[in-house]
Amino acid sequence: MASSLINNSNTALARSPLSLESDLKNPVMVTKGGPLEQARIMWDFFFNKPADTRPSGKIPVQTLTGAQLTSATNNTVYRLGHSTVLMKLHDVFWITDPMFSDRASPVQFAGPERFHAPPISIDELPPIKGVIISHDHYDHLDHDSIMKLAGKAEYFLTPLGVGDILVDWGVPAAKVRQLDWWEGIDIDGIRFVATPAQHFSGRGLFDKNKTQWASWVILAPEQRLFFSGDSGYFDGFRQIGEKYGPFDLTLLETGAYNANWPKVHMHPEESIQAHLDLKGKRLLPIHNGTFDLSMHSWREPFDRIAALGNARGIPVITPLMGEPVSMHGITNGRRWWEDPDRVKETELVQVKGQPAAEQL
């Protein structure tokens, strides 16, 4: 069951001087306004937010148990919130950007607070083969979640530099694999490739772009998946699609977008185009429905991406948080966000042992 490295440079703490310069590369120049413009944006974000950026009631969640996951079939995915997706592939579990804390913040007494509890706790999760990290922002790299997973997960796959953060926190260095863009690694029959994204990094005032960010290609024996992490729209999606597509399922950022930061997050129209560039078959939008990180309504990303997918004939999968989604013949999910108070767990009846999302 030992892993084999495709690229010999991928030792636990491999470095590439081309990727860890003081100002890391981006596919296009990401420009920001001057100090006054940035101050205006921050003022609006903290003091002029519309009331509907948070739901007025509870977000419906389908709770999960360890026993349910243990008996899950292969090629099943569970959206646990924000960009955290649990996947059973080739008889083992993988998880993306695990975020289980109450707040996406360096402290737990302030900062963006969750709309809903995770469908399952980390303690209840089955053994995790690996954790896949896209970048170091607080809503994607959560200290408490990582430390709770340190003893449960066998591998941590990260872009360059992010693995050093994990080791500094106490994750055993032997578990960490850091990859530059276009580098790949094979683990137990699944190939993972770190691919480009258009974003930025940093967890404080003085570490901007000191670590790399990435999207991820996941090539399992029966399914091909793409996980975007955070990214603005760029030509790299087409390049990834040409090299590794078509993808059975794309997990694409669709939320926390705004006209004031157009090149680091995708608007729903851009998520649809990225899905087409990737030659995706089905789209599961992520990075929405859990935290208030922009100025749009909390439900707007769901409304827009569902309408766009319907207009273009693209299956857009919108499961409840925690609802199992089989990658075999999945169809569009329910529009649960339109009246979340009416969604009850008792409505999620399993038929012939199939996940509820497959029946919708």
Image (cartoon, helix red, strand yellow):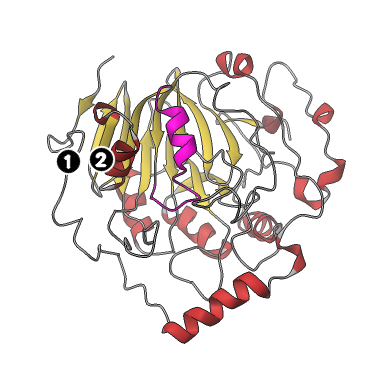
Residue placed most toward the observer, 329 or 25 = 25
Q: Nearer the viewer, residue 184 or 129?
A: 129
Residue 299 occupies quadrant:
bottom right
Image location of residue 214, percent across then percent down: 34, 50
Indicate left or right for 76 with 162 as reference: right
View extreme (right): residue: 342
* Residue 229: x %, y % from top left: 44, 50
Residue type at the position of mark 2: Gln
The answer to whether residue 223 is visible is no
Residue indicated by mark 2? 178
How many badges with numbers are in the image?
A: 2
Q: Say above or below: 25 vs 342.
A: below
Q: Looking at the image, do the residues carrying marks 2 and 1 touch, with CB atoms under 8 Å apart?
A: yes
Residue 331 x %, y %? 65, 38
Residue picked out by circle 1: 14
Quadrant of image for the N terminus: top left
Query: Which residue does the image show at 30% across and 61% down from the upper left?
Result: 209
- Mark 2 surroundings within 10 Å by alpha-carbon count, few (fewer than 14), some (14 through 19), many (20 or more): many
**Dot 1 lies on which element?**
loop
Looking at the image, tell me whether mark 2 or mark 1 is earlier in sequence order.
1
Q: Residues within 10 Å of mark 1 (few under 14, many from 20)?
A: some
Which residues make up the magenta segment? 134-151
Residue 307 appears left or right of 157: right
Measured in 3D between alpha carbons, the distance from the residue under mark 2 to the one under mark 1, in whole angstroms, is 6 Å
Label annotation for residue 271: none
**Where is residue 46, by image quadrant?**
bottom right
Instruction: Look at 39% across and 50% down and name the residue there.
Output: 136
Q: Is residue 339 magenta?
A: no
**Residue for point 44% across, 45% down:** 141
